[in-house]
Image (cartoon, grey):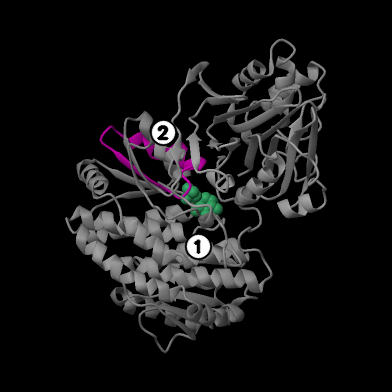
Amino acid sequence: MCGIIGYIGKKDAIPLVLNGLKNLEYRGYDSAGIGAIVNGELIVKKDVGKIDEVFSKINISSIGSNITIGHTRWATHGKVTKENAHPHTDCKNEIAIVHNGIIENYQELKKELISKGHVLKSETDSEIIAHLIEEEMKQRNFEDAFKKAIEKLKGSYAIVAINKNEKEMMGARKESPLVVGVSEDGYFIASDVPSFLDETKRVIYLYDGDVVVINNEIKIFNKGVEVKREIDSIEWDAEQAKKGVFKHFMLKEISEQAEVVKKAIMQDEKIIKEIVNAIKNAKGVYFVGCGTAYHACLEGSYIFSKVAKTHVNVCYAHEFPNYVHFLTPESLVIAISQSGETADTLAAIRAAKEKGAKVMSIVNVAGSTLVRESDKVLLQHAGPEICVLSTKSYTSQLTILVMLAYALVDKLDEAKSKLKELIRYIYYLTSKNTQEYIKKLAEKLKDARDIYLIGRDLQYPTALEAALKIKEVSYIHAEGFAGGELKHGNIALIEKGTPCIIFTSKENEEGIIANASELKARGAYVIGVGPRNSEVFDFFIKVRGAEEANSIVQIIPIQILAYQLAILRGLDPDRPRNLAKSVTVK
Ligand code: G6P
């Protein structure tokens, strides 16, 4: 959702905050702004547009500041306008705040503030926070007023606030991520680690309900009591969070997949064994996730069934509340999430915990809320994924699921050697040669109105994920079907030339080729992805068979196709419209 960052320290704060905002842009890019304290004055600059667009219009290079906050917005309350962009200020323009989340009781608070004479300038729920602090400051200092104001908020928030009269910065979080970066010369408070990775790798992960006060020192409070939080060290490199030689993060992250699979294989075997034992002992196992992570869940359930004859239930995290009625302390919920901050996924595991169920997770971001709230965690070690679309985190999640399935039948080593064998092949699949070949297909499909993706068995979740990749980034309508479902309605959509991408495997060749023939007979342009060409295909992408790991290799050409489609249609693959990488609101 929105990205927020603040810096207080000895260095020039504005360039640090702007750089931080650029690194947070994947969280939202409708509008952006900064608020800086300069010689005891509060300067706010904000506008509609992506960060570069906003700040190229504003001359800020000459302004020196040691306390600055910034925001990149993904609109929830209020249209995308300059007034609704953050930071928001109080009536006297002395206090500025940036917020990520949703204040549920803002209507009620707004009424109260207006009745006390406050004048609100925007349509956002966020602005009331600045006025609440202003109101509280009639009776107390900035720090206590901030704490009092926070107590009045219902909903989810990560907030950073400054006051032009104080050399202080305040932060607070509830159900929205917020971390503190500790550098030699100052402190950052931000939504996510990549925002300050250029400056420091030392981080304090804030807990739900934490309020942080930074002046000459840092103090953290929870429920009114001062608490100690450890300083952790980030394993990621600033370079990993940069595009390097690649034009876009999407292509960079697609190209990293061989390395990412390699890293995913290097799991702590002790944790794998503990999770396997928990699965064996559980009465009911549930996989939950959203978006791409949900597709990994679905694929995982097929892999578990095939390899380990183990049944798992699969559920979208946001639908999971419908299942909690069956949960008992013997149930096991396995959440899958790249960010570890998806609000729906967190709500699902919290609901499970309330029923006493065990929660384990597969997560990429260390220190995320999901990591902290799970009983056991397998970290993906995929490195920062910046592009809004998940690519490398998906293949990494699948790798871990394959290992878990094999580990359930005491064959972890076999899984590892199978997966290791794939690494060199994944290099080939992501190579320039493959990219050039797929570009030919992208040129044929770039003006398509619809693209259908069809798979059976293990290739069904692949078809769903492939459709998601294409629609997210190219805005071409794309839909994934199970082969068996075609004749139950979907085939009515096929017209002359409709592109249909068919995922095949040795195991289901007969059934899926029959589907391909049915589509071809209705005029479809049939594209095959799999180990063997067929006369029914108009275009063929050869992908070597990999049995249960088929989904890892078969998705890669379609990730590349989605990327190429975006480029040919003149779109920015890293910043698809209306989307945000981390959906931290429900
Ligand atoms: C958003 C992103 C998707 C992602 C989903 C789940 O919708 O745009 O790419 O798959 O959230 O995110 P998570 O971080 O929980 O894997």
Q: In the image, is 353 to the left or to the right of 161?
A: left
Callout 2 secondary element: helix
Residue at 64% x, 16% y is 144
Q: Which labelled disc corresponds to residue 253?
A: 1
Residue 223: x and y, percent?
A: 51, 18
Q: Is residue 387 visible?
A: yes
Residue at 26% x, 67% y is 418
Residue 127: x and y, percent?
A: 73, 30
Query: How many other residues sit within 10 Å of disc 1, few (<14), some (14-19) or many (≥20)?
Result: many
Tell me the magenta residue range. 323-350
Q: Amino acid at mark 2?
A: Ala
Q: Quadrant of residue 399?
A: bottom left
Query: Which residue occupies the foreground of this view, 384 or 390?
Result: 384
Q: Which residue is mark 2?
A: 351
Mark 1 CB within 8 Å of ligand 1: no
Mark 1, mark 2: which one is toward the viewer? 1
Residue that extends furthest to the top in the rendered view of this protein: 139
CA gap, disc 1 to disc 2?
33 Å
Q: Is residue 75 visible?
A: no
Magenta span includes 347: yes
Q: Amino acid at mark 1?
A: Glu
Q: Earlier in the sequence, mark 1 or mark 2?
A: 1
Callout 1 secondary element: helix
Q: Which labelled disc corresponds to residue 559?
A: none
Q: Residue 561, relative to residue 360: is it above or below? A: below
